[in-house]
Image (cartoon, rainbow, N blue to C red):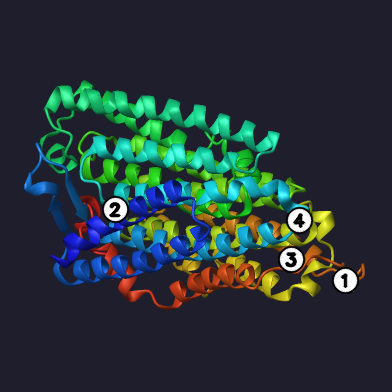
């Protein structure tokens, strides 16, 4: 019963709060956001405890089982994604409360004020949709939640109000709608063939025929477009770089993980019998290309938010290495590594975007040449960026190191030295752009600039996230054990060292 209430509350609490905030337009919108964040924390850990104690949890809403009803389902990877969403969501909520409150008090920034009331209902709807996606047990509800995520994310990007942000939002909307069309066509094919949209029932009945393969291909391609895997990443850099400061971290940390999570569900839980190993290696090749291309583009940028956005293109590439490596005898290592990397990247990248937003607030620009010496004025923010960079580079002690070490061992364990080389080279390239930002910020060639003061919470929120990434590299037993609960058959039958 506790798990049932927790699963329902994770979806309904932020959705109800979004309606209240939108209808009342109360002055205390930030307080509503913080209250929801606290409730979500309790519900997430209650559900996680139930999963650790009793295994996967399935709840038929209204008492109706599939295929007639709408069931909710949570296993280990669902719990890890919910923990990730809660961690990034709570810190982003606190950061946004401080950010928008400072805008209201500063008459020089009055042009940004119209977005304040709109941000909170959109963010709460996005949070509800993310939780619903991680708990969905049928492929059509996955489509519905993906659309809610897309609509909320597009509106949040456009809150910046500038021409660049609006163009980026429209481009993202068109790309996401195209991905949704492909996905929905695949769902229609599955339903017409098997008469159900429950992914549990589909996993038991799918046959390796042409229609099933076409449905799987359509759905995966649509989701690749939403996840911005190279070369389908054309919409991502501008969208993430031009969104408001509290939004960029949400987009990179959470929104991309939603569509990646759906790919994991479909690939390993539903379509494994029909997906050839060559298809998995194709995704791994694209992932490797994303690591190299995204890293090189990040190094070339002069705007810090664009640099971090292209870094996201690279880090997403690591996630897709699992589809080639999980087909091999070291599949359990690859599964653990990809899932843990999703958590590590979400926290580290959200922290990095928050730091960039805070420093932009101080100097009014994210051009790197405007940041000379700013680290001597705000050493805590640069320290936070360095901690996040440790995980992005894959250095110990960080969750990013653990995840990439697992992927590296999976690659070496089956003799895939080219994949291992890409993992190592990607870490070296990440070091270049991370140290470039830190080096300019700590430069002593110019006097310390006079800048606007940053609210305290805009310093502490990203630091909490960065510290969580470091703790995730030290405390690994429980997260790894969590990932083994409800692991897919291809991973579960492997015995990892």
Q: Earlier in the sequence, mark 1 or mark 4?
A: 4
- Kindly identify which numbered label has been placed on residue 448: 1
Q: Earlier in the sequence, mark 4 or mark 3?
A: 4
Where in the figure is residue 15, as x and y percent of width and height?
35, 50
Q: Residue at x 33, y 52 (%)?
A: 16
Q: Residue at x 15, y 37 (%)?
A: 202
- Kindly identify which numbered label has been placed on residue 107: 4
On screen, residue 101 versus residue 189, left or right, reads right
- Kindly identify which numbered label has been placed on residue 12: 2
Structural crowding at the residue carrying mark 4, measured as other residues with C-alpha within 10 Å and reported as few (<14), some (14–19) or many (≥20): few
Q: Residue at x 60, y 42 (%)?
A: 159
- Kindly identify which numbered label has been placed on residue 439: none
**3D distance between C-alphas at marks 3 and 2:** 42 Å
Q: Earlier in the sequence, mark 2 or mark 4?
A: 2
Q: Nearer the viewer, mark 1 or mark 4?
A: 4
Judged from the image, the secondary structure of the residue bearing numbered disc 3 is: helix
Q: Which residue is mark 3?
A: 438
The front one of 53 and 66 is 66
Judged from the image, the secondary structure of the residue bearing numbered disc 1 is: loop
Q: Earlier in the sequence, mark 2 or mark 1?
A: 2
Structural crowding at the residue carrying mark 2, measured as other residues with C-alpha within 10 Å and reported as few (<14), some (14–19) or many (≥20): some
Q: Residue at x 58, y 51 (%)?
A: 116
């Amino acid at each position: 019963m506790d798990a049932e209430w927790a699963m329902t509350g994770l979806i309904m609490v932020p959705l109800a709060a979004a309606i209240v905030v939108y209808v009342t337009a109360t002055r205390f919108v930030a307080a509503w956001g913080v209250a929801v964040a606290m409730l979500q924390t309790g519900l997430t850990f209650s559900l996680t405890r139930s999963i650790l104690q009793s295994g996967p949890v399935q709840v038929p809403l209204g008492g109706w089982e599939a295929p007639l009803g709408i069931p909710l389902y949570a296993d280990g990877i669902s719990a890890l994604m919910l923990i990730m969403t809660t961690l990034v969501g709570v810190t982003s909520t606190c950061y946004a409360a401080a950010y928008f409150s400072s805008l209201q008090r500063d008459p020089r920034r009055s042009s940004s004020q119209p977005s304040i009331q709109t941000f909170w209902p959109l963010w709460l709807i996005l949070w509800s949709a993310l939780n619903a996606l991680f708990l969905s047990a049928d492929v059509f509800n996955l489509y519905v939640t993906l659309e809610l995520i897309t609509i909320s994310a597009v509106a949040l990007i456009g809150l910046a109000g500038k021409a660049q942000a609006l163009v980026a939002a429209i481009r993202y909307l068109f790309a996401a709608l195209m991905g949704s069309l492909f996905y929905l066509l695949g769902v229609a094919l599955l339903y017409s063939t098997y008469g159900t949209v429950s992914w549990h029932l589909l996993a038991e009945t799918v046959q390796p025929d042409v229609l099933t393969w076409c449905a799987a291909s359509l759905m995966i391609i649509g989701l690749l477009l939403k996840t911005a895997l190279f070369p389908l990443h054309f919409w991502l850099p501008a969208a993430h770089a031009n969104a408001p400061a509290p939004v960029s971290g949400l987009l990179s940390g959470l929104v991309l993980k939603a569509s990646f999570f759906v790919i994991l569900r479909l690939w390993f839980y539903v379509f494994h019998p029909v997906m050839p190993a060559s298809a998995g290696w194709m995704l791994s090749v694209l992932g490797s290309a994303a690591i190299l291309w995204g890293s090189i583009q990040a190094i070339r940028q002069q705007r810090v938010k664009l640099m971090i956005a292209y870094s996201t293109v690279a880090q997403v590439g690591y996630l897709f290495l699992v589809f080639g490596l999980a087909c091999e005898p070291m599949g359990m290592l690859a599964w653990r590594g990809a899932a843990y990397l999703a958590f590590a990247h979400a926290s580290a990248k959200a922290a990095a975007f928050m730091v960039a937003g805070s420093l932009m607030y101080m100097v009014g620009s994210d051009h790197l040449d405007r940041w000379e010496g700013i680290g001597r004025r705000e050493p805590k923010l640069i320290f936070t960026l360095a901690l996040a960079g440790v995980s992005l580079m894959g250095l110990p002690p960080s969750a990013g190191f653990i995840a990439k070490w697992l992927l590296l061992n999976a690659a070496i364990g089956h003799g895939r030295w080219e994949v291992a080389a890409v993992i190592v080279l990607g870490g070296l390239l990440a070091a270049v752009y991370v140290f470039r930002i830190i080096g300019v910020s700590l430069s002593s060639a110019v006097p310390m600039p006079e800048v606007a003061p940053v609210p305290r919470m805009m310093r502490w929120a990203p630091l909490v996230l960065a510290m969580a990434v470091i703790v995730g590299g030290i405390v690994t037993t429980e997260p790894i054990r969590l990932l083994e609960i409800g692991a897919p058959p291809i991973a579960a039958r492997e015995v990892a060292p």
